[in-house]
């Protein structure tokens, strides 16, 4: 039997297999209220399996970190009720679901201050320091492309309010019936902006030393734990190294020491799981020929550096295929694998991996199609698919003999 189809205990969560839906931003929430929609309910229900874990798309804890239209929130009663419908539907199929709690910090454009859900006490754009993200964004209120906004550094006396926002989101998640919550501390968003020294120039207790830069991470975990037991809390981080993926310009002068400290810190909490992003993503450059995407055949960065530091379950995500994922679990590099692109295009991915069935190709142009069912709930299950258009699993990247550690 494939290692992916052995059971796994994640804190209080008992999984029947190790194929996880990774968190994926899809922009299908209600544009004005940011309430999860019936379309989202259909999407998650399609992908639910008995004893399988789904991790939701990044979900805003407040309008302060709102990065775009059509992303879901979890700070209002209406948003919480919308999520409850999704949770109940996933549970009806025997599935488990964790909600990812998100604050984007400097990635939220200043025009989102005029969004209908804006809060005068929680206006974007904020960060650890006044360091503007590089590049441009379409995450403006109008959808027009613009440079990122210059952030305002959060004052030290504002941090308790931020932590209350995390607590409220966790409380709402519990009331919606989520099995777990996941703290998004990765990918260049707010907590990652505090972690990395090129985005954190503070001189107070949240800046300077690595221990200080990890303080907000610790405090956010502890705030969430007041509403959700740690055995139902996960955390996602994204270690980055020279020559690997940079998320929105966030980087550190000593990433090995930074993430060693962060992971040792998280190890103290006996969390349900730690989710690590493998930094081998190429942004769709090879979508026209999936077999040539080097991200699918690159070795693993994280396990050799961090596996020995963390005693609990670790989920890996980023560039895994149905062929490389079982090896990563069998060899002890990860305990479960999060799939993104191939779970988008294959609602029955778990079944297809187990039965070694070919896969639907994904269409990146529909990944972020605001409010649309296209490329969201219309990918066929295997029995309804055009078999001539499918991709054999063995043609996706290359099977690693062993992870290149």
Image: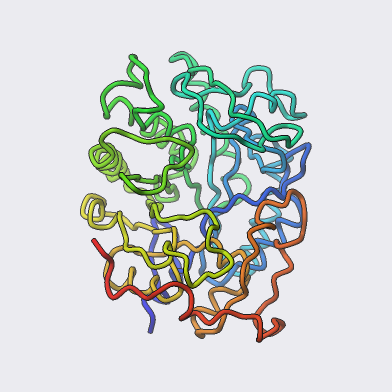
Q: Nearer the viewer, residue 249 or 378?
A: 249
Q: Is residue 391 left or right of residue 16?
A: right
Q: Is residue 135 left or right of residue 141?
A: left
Residue 19 against residue 41 in the figure, above or below: below
**Quadrant of the rendered image containing residue 5:** bottom left
Residue 154: horizontal and vertical position, in percent?
49, 18
Residue 375: horizontal and vertical position, in percent?
71, 62
State whether residue 360 appears in this view.
yes
**Quadrant of the rendered image containing residue 113:** top right
Q: Nearer the viewer, residue 204 or 228?
A: 204
Q: Residue at x 72, y 47 (%)?
A: 29
Q: The N terminus is located in which quarter? A: bottom left
Q: Residue at x 73, y 32 (%)?
A: 141
Q: Residue at x 66, y 65 (%)?
A: 45
Residue 17: horizontal and vertical position, in percent?
45, 72
Residue 176: horizontal and vertical position, in percent?
63, 48
Q: Residue at x 33, y 68 (%)?
A: 328
State whether residue 275 appears in this view.
no
């Amino acid at each position: 039997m494939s290692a992916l189809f052995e059971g796994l205990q994640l804190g209080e969560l008992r999984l029947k297999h190790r194929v996880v839906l990774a968190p994926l931003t899809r922009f299908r929430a209600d544009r004005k209220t940011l309430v999860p929609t019936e379309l989202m309910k259909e999407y998650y229900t399609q992908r639910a399996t008995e004893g399988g874990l789904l991790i939701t798309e990044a979900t805003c804890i407040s309008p302060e970190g709102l990065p775009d239209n059509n992303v879901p929130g979890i700070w209002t009663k209406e948003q919480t009720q919308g999520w409850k419908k999704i949770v109940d539907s996933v549970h009806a199929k025997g599935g488990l679901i964790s909600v990812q709690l998100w604050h984007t910090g400097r990635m939220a454009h200043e025009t989102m201050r005029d969004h209908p859900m804006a809060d005068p006490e929680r206006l974007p754009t904020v960060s650890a320091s006044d360091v503007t993200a590089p590049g441009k964004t379409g995450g403006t209120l109008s959808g027009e492309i613009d440079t990122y906004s210059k952030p305002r550094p959060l004052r030290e006396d504002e941090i308790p309010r931020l932590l209350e926002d995390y607590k409220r989101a966790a409380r709402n998640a519990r009331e919606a019936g989520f099995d777990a919550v996941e703290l998004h501390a990765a990918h260049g968003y707010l907590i990652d902006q505090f972690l990395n020294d090129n985005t954190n120039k503070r001189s107070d207790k949240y800046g300077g030393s690595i221990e200080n830069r990890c303080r907000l991470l610790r405090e956010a975990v502890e705030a969430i734990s007041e509403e959700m037991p740690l055995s139902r809390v996960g955390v996602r981080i994204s270690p980055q190294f020279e020559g690997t993926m940079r998320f929105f310009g966030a980087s550190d002068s000593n990433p090995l020491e930074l993430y060693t400290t962060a992971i040792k810190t998280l190890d103290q909490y006996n969390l349900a799981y730690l989710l690590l992003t493998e930094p081998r993503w190429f942004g769709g450059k090879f979508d026209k020929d999936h077999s040539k995407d080097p991200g699918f055949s690159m070795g693993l960065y994280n396990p050799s550096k961090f596996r020995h530091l963390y005693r609990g379950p670790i989920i890996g995500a980023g560039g895994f295929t149905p062929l490389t994922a079982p090896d990563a679990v069998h060899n002890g590099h990860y305990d479960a694998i999060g799939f993104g692109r191939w779970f988008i295009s294959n609602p029955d991915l778990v079944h297809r991996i187990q039965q070694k069935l070919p896969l639907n190709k994904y269409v990146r142009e529909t990944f972020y199609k605001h409010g649309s069912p296209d490329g969201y709930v219309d990918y066929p299950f295997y029995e309804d698919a055009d078999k001539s258009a499918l991709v054999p699993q063995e043609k996706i990247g290359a099977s690693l003999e062993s992870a290149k550690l």
